[in-house]
Amino acid sequence: MMEFLAMGGYAPYVWGSYLIMAGLLVVEMLQLRYRRRSLLAWIRRMARLRAQEEKQ
Amino acid sequence: MSERGIQWFRFTAPANFYDLAGRLIPWFAALTIALFAVGLYLGLVVAPSDYQQGDSYRIIYIHVPTAWMGMFLYVLMAAYAAIGLIWRIKMADVMAKAIAPTGALFTFLALWTGALWGRPTWGVYWVWDARLTSMLILLFLYLGYMALHAAIDDRQRASNASAVLAMVGVVNVPIIYFSVQWWNTLHQGASITVTEAPTMATIMFVTLLIMVLAAWMYSVAVVLARARVELLERERNARWVQERLEGGTK
């Protein structure tokens, strides 16, 4: 296991590449999910406000 | 208008695209996970060390896929931008805009992994040679496209202006590809070409292909997801959006 993590002495370069890639892909997906959720919440809020106005 | 014409527009209609993309995304996501799992296992565990570079060469399994995706996605983005500009199809602009951040991300990752591979093999993180510089320009083209699209308030004008930028910038892609032949550079030539057998061991070649496929599937899933959000934003007052929200989040 330690040998695997050491990557023949190239650990900072190999893991620095793989982990940054994994991290950025996860950030991209989370950012997209956040954008979608806040937009849906906004659209719902607007729909509720419109419905209330129509009742009055 | 002919029957075929109507059918064709059906698929570009926002509501149909929204539903279809929503059904496709889970499949592309599942393929992404499966391919990355196999590719990472093969690349990090099964494939042997390189006799010259030791384990540092394993960066190739993400460096090449990210670099290819950066270039592929740019051409795809420019093609959608051109379709949007010439035929005034709004969905094409949505797609082009949805591709840009993922393309920029992959281009950045190609530069990043390249720097981390360059240090142990060349002794430097960065050199201003043709391949590296043209790849950096690709990143700036993506960022410029996104900035220009965001900077203009009028949607049609933003779409047109950024489409022109995307189309002009496409000349950079063949420059990147042929840079290692046209100029004397530190970067090695292509290891994989369409016309010749690959100059690497079979296990390495197969692993690389799997990682490239994984990056493709990831890109399709994320771009479709972003296009859906973009559509929701643009059409938030349309009846089809309201209908879908009443039936629960889809």
Image (tube, coloured by chain):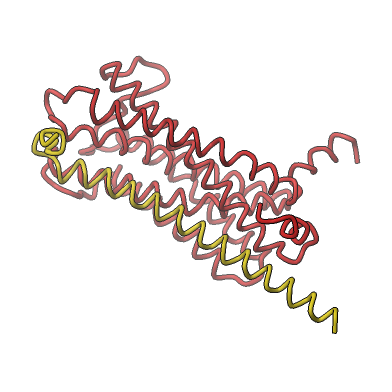
Q: For the point 29% across and 18% down, which residue is it?
A: B203
B211 is higher (above) or lower (below) than B152: above
Residue projecting furthest to the bottom: A56
In percent of width and height, residue B214 lies at 43, 34
Residue with the most extreme left position: A9
Q: Number of marks in the image? A: 0
Residue B197 to residue B17: above or below: above
The hue of chain B in the figure is red
Between residues B157 and B203, which one lies in front from this camera angle? B203
The chain painted yellow is A
Q: Which residue is at a point 51% across and 39% down the rendered structure image?
A: B29
In this view, the residue in front, B180 or A56, is A56
Q: Position of residue A38 (x, y in %)?
A: 57, 66
> Could you say where residue B208 lies in the image, as x and y percent from the top left?
34, 27
**Is the N terminus of chain B in the top left, top right, bottom left or bottom right quadrant?**
top right
Figure quadrant of residue B46: top left
Q: Is residue B230 left or right of residue B128?
A: right
Give the quadrant of residue B232: bottom right
Q: Residue at x 11, y 26 (%)?
A: B52
Residue drawn at point x = 41 percent, y = 17 percent:
B195
Q: Where A55 falls versus A13 (above or below)?
A: below
Find residue B245 and report its horizontal and vertical position in percent.
Answer: 71, 59
